[in-house]
Image (cartoon, rainbow, N blue to C red):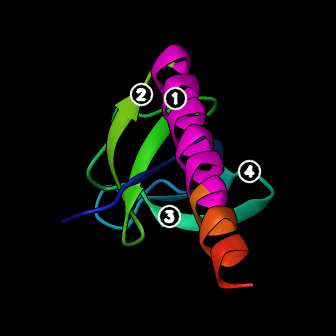
Amino acid sequence: MCLAIPGELLTIINDDPLTRSGLVKFGGVTKEINLAYVPEVQVGNYVIVHVGFAIGILNSEQAQQVFADLNAMAVAQEATLGEVSDEIC
C-alpha cells in the first residue's frame, strides 16, 4: 500500500525540468520536494507527495477533504486506543 500526503507548494527552488524542486508545507512542517512529475504545478497549488516526489496536483477543496479525512482517522484511532488502554487498566 502506498501513502501519499497532500501539501501546499510554497515556492519553487529549482526550475530545471529534470531536477525541479520546491518547498512544500505539510501542516507545520516544510520539506523540499521533487516536482519533476508535475511540471505544470504552480506556487499555491496543493500536491500529493509520495517518498519525496510530488505525483499529482489537488485543488483546494480536494486537499481540505483529505485533511478532514486524515483528522477523522486520527480521532477514531485515538478513541480506539483509549478504549483499549481503559480495558487494560
Is residue 71 found inside the magenta-colored segment of the image? yes
Rendered residue at 66%/59% (across/down): 78
Instruction: Please tell me whether mark 3 sits on a helix, a strand or a loop.
Output: strand
In space, the residues marked 1 and 2 are separated at their CA atoms by 6 Å
Question: Closest to the observer: 15 or 1?
Answer: 1
Q: In this view, does 59 lie to the left or right of 2?
A: right
Q: Give the residue at mark 1.
A: 63
Instruction: Look at the numbered discs 2 and 4 and tell me whether their residues touch, using CB distance below 8 Å.
Output: no
* Residue neighbourhood size for the residue with mark 3, other residues' Cα within 10 Å, grouped as few (<14), some (14–19), many (≥20): many
Nearer to us: label 3 or label 4: 4
From the top left corner, tell me how far across and down residue 40 is, in percent.
Answer: 35, 32
Q: Which of marks 3 and 4 is nearer the N terminus?
A: 4
What separation in Å lies between label 1 and label 4 (alpha carbons)?
12 Å
Is 50 on the left or on the right of 85, as rendered? left
Which residue sits furthest right? 28
Report how far apart the C-alphas of labels 2 and 3 lie in the structure: 16 Å
User: From which residue to which does the magenta span run?
Assistant: 60-79
Assess whether residue 6 is covered by the magenta stretch: no
Residue corresponding to mark 4? 27
Residue tagged 3: 33
Q: Describe the element under mark 1 as helix, strand or loop.
A: helix
Amino acid type at mark 2:
Leu
Instruction: Please report contact status of discs 1 and 2: CB closer than 8 Å, yes or no.
Output: yes
The Cα atoms of the two marked residues, 2 and 4, are separated by 16 Å
Residue 55 to residue 81: above or below: above
In space, the residues marked 3 and 1 are separated at their CA atoms by: 17 Å
Q: Name the residue under label 2.
A: 58
Provide the secondary structure element on which disc 4 rests. Answer: loop
| Percent x, y of residue 16 | 40, 59
Q: Of marks 2 and 4, which one's residue comes earlier in the chain?
A: 4
Q: Residue furthest bottom?
A: 89
Q: Earlier in the sequence, mark 1 or mark 2?
A: 2
